[in-house]
Every structure is written in structure tokens, then in C-alpha cells.
Image (cartoon, coloured by chain):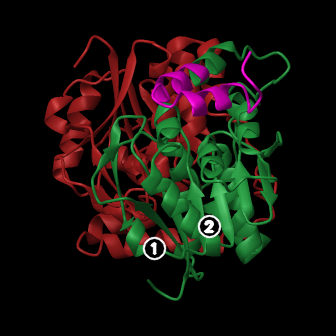
Chain colours: A green, B red
């Protein structure tokens, strides 16, 4: 590696592509401005694997090549993320890297992987809104915010929130002016065509059912973890 | 292919990853809800290639496998996008697919590829703000908006604008309720940490210089095209 500070995005099969590409893009622009950071992707190996959409990814580095990153960011997803929560190789990497990292981050349900690695105990944290009750299973204090910083732990809400979190991180690392330049480069001046989410009137049932079903199917062979997640750490009824 | 309507994202080496992953994610969620669309990625071949950030990707299909998509979307980038404007294989695919496609789309400087394929003549279109003067080189009428629809041609502004454009497209294809469900699934409730872009006070010089430099370097062997682009189709001084 170089004398740049390395931020490693932890990839695994089936993850939600936008969870890591959003913040990766933000940090890559920072690098293109000549600032001393580099954003890389890491995975167990160099195999290509499919995201949760029709594209295949290959990480730039293996876990073994990036042992002490300045920061790590774990993206989320549906079923494959619940599966990753039981992947000891991935959990081992996350745990080891977190020992020395100044930023231990996640996007969306990636925070559940941080939780499974034992990194959220006593921490305020967030996740995808439909997975929020699951955070408590790992001793975290769930917080409904776009991103939450608690010590080294920096967690973002669902999917697209990774962009906001990464711009905030650029502000921390390189200052507000740099963050504004990155925002300008990716023309991040959002205009959701149907306006912002109206949390009070939105019908959440479809997405909530999808999330529960993904967890249920992916953790069939891990009934204890499944039960813990689906009851938010409380004893099941 | 299936009886679903296929939307093909055209990939090429060095493109800006978020340009295609943003709208791909939006359309993939639509598909996960069981609606009759599929979003795929297409490229000349099945080689893995690097994006403009530290990740490699491989398209799910070759150009030859998706000859008459319902829609196509061309992402943009910096230098590699200017290089792609001179890639006859890619331009030929875009031109052929556009003959029957109901949606001929682009994100960011991807519109310059549409222009190079001859698809923007007389069309209102947009692109990354720093490339806006270049659109006129292809007979397009540049419009400063988050996305612009003119007949089948649907162009988005820079990088992150592809998410807004894709949500608009979901609204067109499947209705506003479906678009709101997708927005909820990807928790697209943006909160830029330093607020929206203030176009009146922002210092645009760094990004503008970067864009000009990327075009200049990438088109060194194509001085006529380079000159046309950098003068917006007017005679160079």
C-alpha cells in the first residue's frame, strides 16, 4: 500500500451494489483531487460475484492484502447480508481490521454484520429502517438518523444513506470545502421526483415483509441467530 | 431473455460506477417486487474491467445477447467516457438498440456518447453541469435540469442524478406508488450533510478544469472531435 490512508469496503456475494458504490464514489473523488486517501474494495478472494442486481463485482484487494486499514465500511443487503453474518472468514476480517481502524463503518444492514462481529455492544447505531428492531439483538442502541457516529463506529441508514454518510466522513477527514467539491463533482443535489419520503403516511408493509422473509430464509440453518434478530434480542413469544 | 421488458445498462472500462449502479439499483428493486421489468448490464464482452474507482465489474450480458432492449441507459465518466465516444463497437450497439428502444437514456456524460452516436440531434438533453457546453457539439439543445425527457431520449444530470431519473422512469413505467415503494426500499430520503449545492456561490473551477483536462487527454488522437467538444460545436478561436 502507499502512505495514503486506506478505507476498505468489505465486499461479499449478493450485497446491495449501491450500498458500497455510493460511498466508494464519494471517497474516490476525494482521491482524484489529490488528497491523501484511497478507497479500495476487499474480499476473501479475487473471484467475481454477483451483486443483488445484474452485475458482477471483483474486489481490488484481498482481506490478506489490507490488514490495517484506516477505515472499513461494510455494506448491507437482503438475504446475502444475513448469510454473511454467519461467515467466520468475513467476521474475522472485520473484527481484526476494527482493532486499529479509526472508522468502523457500515451502510444499511451492514451494521448487522458489525453487530455479529461484536462491534456494536453499547454503541448508538443505525441501519435500514425495516431492520431497525434487529440492532438491539447485538446490544446496540438503535437510533433513527441518516448516519450515526459513536466513537469509531459510523453507521448509515438504508442503501442511499451511504452517500450522505460518506460526504460527512469527507468533511471530517478533509474539511467542509473538500466535501462540497466532491458533492459538486457527483452533482449531488438530489431531487426525488415524488418528494422526500413521508414517513407518517407511507405504507411500509411490503418492504418490511420482504426484509423479514429475507432474514428468515437466509438463516434457516441458524435458528438461534434468526430468533434473536427477529425478536430484537427479546425472548421469542 | 424473458417476457419481461429489459432495460440494458451499457458498460465500458473506466466509467463512473455510481452512474450506472444508482439507476440499476432502482430498477432492480422494481424487479424484486415482481413487476415485469428486468435491468441487466451489457458490454462488448465478458471481461472484468475497472470502474473509475477501486472495483472491477463484469456485465451480465454481451451486446450480442441483448439486441432489442425495451430501454438502454448509457452511464458517463471522465476520460474513459470521452474515449468511449470513439469506440465504434459501442457506438454501433447504442445506435442499433436505440432504433427500437422506448427509452434511450443516459446519466452524466453518458449523453455525450448518445450524441456521438447521432441520437441527440434536435433533442433537448442534459449532462454533468461541467460538460454542459459540450452537448451543443452534437446538435442537442442543452437544458439545465435534473433529468430531461424528449421523445424516447431521457438524459440525467451528473452522476447521482441517475437515481432521480430512474425513480422518475419507474413512475412512468409502473406508476407513482411503485416508485414510492422503491424509494422506501432504498431509503432515498437524501440529507446532504452540508445542504444542497448552492450554484450561485460555489467555486466550480476545480471540477471544470478536471473535466476539460480529461477530454483533452482522452481525445489526443481525435483532434477534430476534441475541438468540437471543447468549443461546443462553434469554430475554435
**Which residue does the numbered mark 1 point to in the structure image?**
A66
**Viewer-proximal residue, B45 or A67?**
A67
The image quadrant that residue B86 belongs to is: bottom left
The question of residue B129 being in magenta is answered with no
Residue B224 vertical position relative to residue A11 in the rendered view, above or below: below
* Residue B159 visible in the shown view: no
**Percent x, y for residue A33?**
57, 77
**Percent x, y for residue B204?**
67, 68
Give the magenta part as a residue range.
Answer: A212-237
Q: Secondary structure at mark 2?
A: helix
Q: Quadrant of the N terminus of chain B?
A: top left
**Percent x, y for residue B60?**
26, 38
Position of A233 with respect to B77 (left or right) is: right
Position of A45 with respect to B34 (left or right) is: left
Q: Which residue corresponds to the image point at 22% horizontal and 47% vertical from the top-left?
A: B90
**Percent x, y for residue A114?**
63, 52
Chain for numbered disc 1: A
Q: Which residue corresponds to the image point at 19% horizontal and 53% vertical from the top-left?
A: B47
Pointer 2 or 1: first along the chain: 1
Residue B204 vertical position relative to residue A10 in the rendered view, above or below: below
Q: CA distance from mark 2 to mark 1?
A: 12 Å
Q: Which residue corresponds to the image point at 55% horizontal and 74% vertical from the top-left?
A: A69
Residue B175 vertical position relative to residue A84 in the rendered view, above or below: above
**Which residue does the numbered mark 2 point to in the structure image?**
A98
Residue A105's tag is none
* Residue A153 visible in the shown view: yes
Amino acid at each position: 500500500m502507499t502512505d495514503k490512508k486506506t478505507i476498505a469496503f468489505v465486499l461479499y456475494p449478493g450485497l446491495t451494489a449501491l450500498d458500497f458504490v455510493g460511498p466508494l464514489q464519494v471517497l474516490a473523488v476525494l482521491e482524484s483531487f489529490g488528497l491523501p486517501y484511497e478507497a479500495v474494495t476487499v474480499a476473501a478472494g479475487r473471484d467475481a460475484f454477483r451483486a443483488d442486481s445484474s452485475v458482477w463485482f471483483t474486489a481490488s484487494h484481498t482481506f490478506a492484502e489490507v490488514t490495517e486499514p484506516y477505515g472499513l465500511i461494510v455494506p448491507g443487503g437482503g438475504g446475502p447480508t444475513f448469510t454473511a453474518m454467519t461467515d467466520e472468514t468475513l467476521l474475522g476480517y472485520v473484527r481484526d481490521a476494527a482493532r486499529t481502524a479509526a472508522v468502523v463503518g457500515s451502510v444499511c444492514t451492514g451494521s448487522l454484520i458489525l453487530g455479529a462481529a461484536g462491534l456494536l455492544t453499547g454503541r448508538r447505531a443505525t441501519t435500514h429502517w425495516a431492520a431497525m428492531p434487529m440492532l438491539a439483538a447485538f446490544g446496540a442502541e438503535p437510533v433513527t438518523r441518516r448516519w450515526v457516529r459513536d466513537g469509531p463506529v459510523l453507521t448509515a441508514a438504508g442503501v442511499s444513506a451511504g452517500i450522505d454518510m460518506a460526504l460527512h466522513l469527507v468533511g471530517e477527514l478533509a474539511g467542509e470545502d473538500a466535501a462540497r467539491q466532491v458533492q459538486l463533482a457527483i452533482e449531488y443535489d438530489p431531487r426525488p421526483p415524488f418528494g422526500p419520503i413521508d414517513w407518517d403516511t407511507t405504507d411500509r408493509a411490503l418492504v418490511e415483509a420482504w426484509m423479514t422473509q429475507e432474514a428468515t430464509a437466509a438463516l434457516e440453518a441458524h435458528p438461534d441467530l434468526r430468533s434473536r434478530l427477529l425478536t430484537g434480542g427479546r425472548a421469542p413469544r
